[in-house]
Amino acid sequence: MKKVLGILLIAIFFVGCKGKNNAKNDDLIIKKSIQIKHAKGFYIQNFNESKKLIIKSPYPNSKEQFEYILTTNKDSNKFYPKGTLISTPVQKIVVTSTTHVSMLELLGVENSLIGFPHTKYISSTKTRKLIEMNSVKEVGVKSSLNTEIILDLNPDVVIGFSMTKTNKSLTLIEKSGIPVVLNGDWLEETPLGRAEWIKFFGVLYNKEKEADSIFNAIEKNYNDAKLIASKAKETPNILSGAIMSKDIWNLPAGESFVAQFLVDANTNYLWKDSKGKGSLSLSFESILDRGKDADIWIAPGYFSSKKQLKKNNENYSAFKAFKNDKLFTFANKVGATGGVIYFELGPTRPDLVLKDIIKITHPELLKDYTPTFFEKMN
């Protein structure tokens, strides 16, 4: 009898504790996850009084994920889900890629940017004005961040990126108490997957609706352009890339987001059936054998003119596209301090990139469109 009574008392105790926990831990109930359609590197969960941002692909071949709790009520006594706490909306931010800058501007929160590494790479006139006003500080060069300056700025969050699990600068910043979030937009495998990371920034600023609306418009524009391209009567053969070192030619692999642009533009990318989601490194001879008679040559490395190409390697002039002046580059459209606009805005606006390629490959379909990134190489 005593044993039974003891079990009952223990049961009553746990039920009581559970009831108190439920009253305290209402925020552990997931209300709704924000819809992520194309991006694979992150997702967002909504709780009663907080949101959880989960980064699934923080760096290449990552086997771990990071979780962040975003809340307007950063109360240490409150019972939140597991994860690093970040107060929202973010008031002061340091970002480390120009793609982040374009997303901040689309959301209208560029004034919250207080630090960036190697600011000369930023092309946008809006953010360049902030740099000139000394509102955005120079905080180092890419992986070599100046941690002293960042700690002095004391941002609400640092948005970084990393090639590996460890990054000394970011680890030091994090240990100082400043949250560091690794942004993996550059690891996405599709153009729309990259653009959807605007929702990542939307949740940091409590602007989920705005981010969703912006992305939906970009997605619609992209799909509309894709539909227009599907009506083309011809599919030109496409060559891309250039020699980067010795006789090795780098070009997009068949499963890469760049190759996806060319497929969606209704062209015949000559390496579309190759494996890989990044780039291919092939011999010049193999490129010449397959691409010599390609109709159009898109993005021939960082070269800015045919003269420069030929000076680098006389053999470039053997290609049909070179002879027929069918070379198109994004390298010539730069900001005031030399930053390439394509690298800054292109990932955020894949709809414009696709339209540029359609204009190049099927000019009759977009007669009134003026390209944003690409132009003919002279």
Image (cartoon, helix red, strand yellow):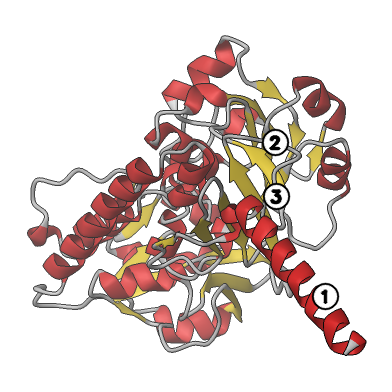
Residue 320 visible: no
Q: Position of residue 115 (x, y in %)?
A: 67, 27
- Contact between marks 2 and 1 (CB within 8 A): the answer is no
Which numbered marker is on residue 314? none
Image quadrant where residue 187 sits: bottom right
Q: Secondary structure at mark 3?
A: loop
Image quadrant where residue 240 sits: bottom left
The 10 Å Cα crowd at callout 3, few under 14, some 14 to 19, many 20 or more, is few
Residue positioned 44% across, 48% down in the render: 198
Q: Secondary structure at mark 2?
A: loop
Q: Which of these two is toward me, 173 or 319? A: 173
Q: Farthest residue toward the top?
A: 133
Q: Which of these two is toward me, 11 or 327? A: 11
In whole angstroms, how far apart are the C-alphas of marks 1 and 3? 24 Å
The amino acid type of the residue labelled 3 equals Phe
Which residue is under mark 2? 75
The amino acid type of the residue labelled 1 equals Ile
Residue positioned 59% across, 66% down in the render: 243
Quick one: quadrant of the N terminus? bottom right
Looking at the image, residue 293 sits to the left or right of residue 5; the answer is left
Which tag, 2 or 1, sits closer to the chain's start? 1
Q: Position of residue 376 (x, y in %)?
A: 31, 50
The amino acid type of the residue labelled 2 equals Asp
Q: Position of residue 219 (x, y in %)?
A: 27, 58
Which residue is under mark 3? 79
Looking at the image, residue 41 sits to the left or right of residue 207; the answer is right
Which residue is under mark 1? 10
- The answer to whether residue 290 is above or below residue 229 is below
Residue positioned 49% across, 66% down in the render: 241
